[in-house]
Amino acid sequence: MNRREAVKLALVGGAVAACARETAPADDDALLESIADTLLPDTPSSPGARAAGAKAGIHLLLADCYDAAAQRKVADGLRDFRARHAGFASRPQAERERILRDVDAEAKRAGDAHWFHLARELANRAYFSSEIGMTRALRFTMIPGKWVGCTDLAPGQPAWG
């Protein structure tokens, strides 16, 4: 093998490795978005996860911040969830909430190994780091004033971002 062939193989190997790092096919992204939007729905005071574009944030966090084992855990969990709860996204909000409460109870019994803990964490991080989450669901101040460690909140007042 000469140097030219070695470089070609290295480039092809790098491209294959980059493709292997891809996470969540489109149907997994759509299901994660539906789960996130069920966990964080539209309210009168703030838009939900779908409006905040949480799907892109979840995909980015999962691809860039978690190892292959965590990505596989979420993908396997979504595959199982899809098999057990077909048509989840098209069900009424109340039924989706009931399903997620059941899955959450199952996850609590299973411990940290359950995929739903990570999916919920990803949904929360993606939503509350989005512009909508920071400015509409939380009270975000780009440049805060003085530090006040303990502040009373009025009833219904959102937390600070």
Image (cartoon, rainbow, N blue to C red):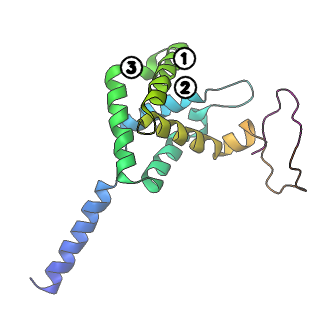
Q: Main secondary structure of the magenta part?
A: loop
Q: CA distance from mark 3 to mark 1?
A: 12 Å
- For image coordinates 22% across by 73% down, the residue present is 10
Q: Quadrant of the N terminus?
A: bottom left
Q: Is residue 109 visible?
A: yes
Is 45 a magenta residue? no
Amino acid type, callout 1: Gln
Q: Secondary structure at mark 3?
A: loop
- Label number found at residue 38: 2
Q: Secondary structure at mark 2?
A: helix
Which residue appears farthest toward the left when viewing the image?
1
Return the x and y of residue 150 as percentages of the image width and height.
87, 45
Say few, some or many: other residues with alpha carbon within 10 Å of mark 3 (under 14 / 14 to 19 / 20 or more). Answer: few
- Which residue matches tag 3? 87
- For image coordinates 86% across by 49% down, the residue present is 149
Amino acid type, callout 3: Gly
In the rendered structure, which segment of residues is drawn in magenta? 151-161
- Which residue matches tag 1? 93
- For image coordinates 54% across by 40% down, the residue present is 121
Q: Nearer the viewer, residue 12 or 74?
A: 74
**Figure label count:** 3
Q: Earlier in the sequence, mark 3 or mark 1?
A: 3
Return the x and y of residue 70 as percentages of the image width and height.
39, 47
Give the vertical position of 90 relative to 133 (above or below).
Answer: above
Q: Quadrant of the C terminus?
A: top right
Amino acid type, callout 2: Thr
Is 159 a magenta residue? yes
